[in-house]
Image (cartoon, coloured by chain):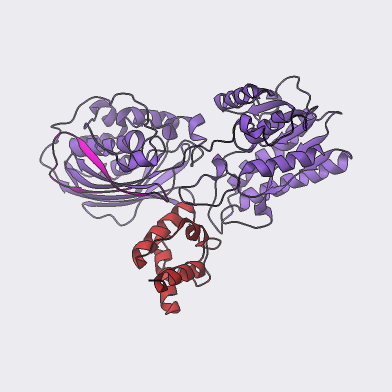
Chain colours: A purple, B red
Amino acid sequence: VRESGTAARVFELLDQRSFAELSGDANPLHVDRVAARRSLAGEVVVHGIHALLWALDEWIAEREGLVEIERLDVEFLRPMPVGDCVRVSDAGSGANVAALEIQSTDATLATIACTFASASGSMSSGVVDEVPPVSSSRPLAADQVRACRGTLPLMRPATSARRMFPHLADKLSARQFAALLASTRMVGMECPGLHSLFSELHLRRAQTPPEGLTYEVRRFDQRFGLTTIDVCGGDLSGTVLAFLRPAPQSQARSADLRQLVAPSEFSGQRALVVGGSRGLGEVLAKLLAAGGADVLLTYCSGEEDARAVVADIVDAGGRASCARFDVTEPDAAPGDFVPTHLYYCATPFISAGTAGTFRQDAFERFREFYVTGFSRTLARFDNPAMQGVFYPSTVFVDAPAPGMSEYAAAKSEGEAVCASLEQQRPGLRVVRPRLLRLATDQTLSVGPSVRHDPVPVLLAAARTLAA
Amino acid sequence: MTNGLEQQVRTVVAAIMRLTPDDVGADASAQTVRGWDSLNHLKLVLALEEEFGVTFTEEQIVQMLSVSKITSVVGQLLSAR
């Protein structure tokens, strides 16, 4: 949708895949829902350069003539989720200067300042008119990132470029267009690679060698994984800032957890662990199985993760199986397992909001899992043999944290469901601890943060429930 | 000295959070300032390091969630020079 000075759109997964093919940046963060759910962003997010090229394409649509970028400064402020409506607004553009902001309904996601100069031709020499070869993102560690350097060919498949960005493909220097595509390929696939997050781009027009986009890490700040990369190619020279973000949070192995648990302390339990493919549910499943419980862990989309947890438990001598169960679709509950204990760890991505605002849509999403989904799961699995229910609440109910009010409010309602359950079912033990920030995918951060080991916390809760 | 330092801190906080210095009071914190999320906190830390020529430890970084705490930490680092 385009109006005067502003345009809006929704980036869909299909658009993302097209851009991945065009640019060669097929980082799972941008194209793979299952993998992206374990990232810092918690969901598939739009390539920053994809959003940039769209914004510039909109800006240049009503302007005439061939252009080159004289200078370009871009900051990607927040991840841009696929499926959300975003808007590009003019923030004081001039005749040759695009000053733009990309915004969601409640936040600025990116700022762009781009100065153009007239160009005399299409400037396509040295640019390969082909899609980049398919490859995998490099999973680099900090020491490897620190020493990273290389050269990427300038590639701009003309047909795809024209289909996705028709105005820019016709008017912007092909070499510079290709250099921008190479920059996202560098960040997402090469350096920092698999666990990257594109943060800033600062480029100036320059005379550059013809062989492609060369890059070299100039500075690496270990505290944040902040990587400063010098880039040069396609008549542009400057700096890219990207984060080496943390990898998905791995949890303790069953073989190690067996040292902490008596072999029969949970024997006789038929434990249903809802949301057991990772995080708190994964740790609980392993602890319970180490103590002799018969575990059924459920997953919503992470079948591969769930099977890996089961294999880890079985390899260590425990009993476990897994089944798909989406708590938002209660009719699809797994078959004939009759639990004695329910451990309810289902959760959506816990996105933090902005201090001082309350996002009704986020609250409803949390509520769907922590209240409605919990109630439905209870209704589906309750039986005369049920002895205990574990419901992880949050310390944010007691101590509000910025941007977490929707989450805390939904957890608080879930606690009320627990209280009601206890009243209706004397003899049923319900444990609902208000947990600190524990080390899971949900609490990953680019900077230093305080996170606690989930093992002792969950083992204590499981023992309370079993007592 | 402290007031001058605090004013400098408030100016840096405002620049990173895209606010005017008047929007960032002496009692401002991550609890009250719109946009003070984890990514902006990181940018704030880097901007403060550049502004004052100091380097924060990871322990200090996780504590620096208000103007008063930042002022206190920066003040300590500057006087330890």
| A262 left or right, relative to A7 | right
Q: Quadrant of the N terminus of chain A?
A: top left
The magenta stretch spans residue A205? yes
Q: Position of residue A301 (x, y in %)?
A: 57, 28
Task: Check the image and name the residue furthest to the right.
Answer: A426
Residue at 85% across / 38% down in the picture? A428
| Residue found at the very far left of the displayed protein | A120
Q: Is residue B21 above or below residue A362?
A: below
Please name whichever residue, A231 or B53, is drawn nearer the observer in this view of the structure. Answer: B53
Of B37 and A379, which appears nearest the observer? B37
User: Quick one: which residue is furthest to the top in this view?
Assistant: A336
The quadrant where residue A460 appears: top right
Q: Position of residue A375 (x, y in %)?
A: 75, 37
| Residue at the image point whose x is 51% and y is 65% from the top | B66
Residue at image location 53% in from the left, 54% down from the top: A354
Q: Position of residue A188 (x, y in %)?
A: 36, 36
The main secondary structure of the magenta stretch is strand
Q: Which residues are magenta?
A: A200-224
Q: Would you identify the image quadrant in which residue A291 lies?
A: top right
Q: Please name the residue shown 69% across and 24% down the image.
A: A318
Q: Position of residue B80 (x, y in %)?
A: 41, 71
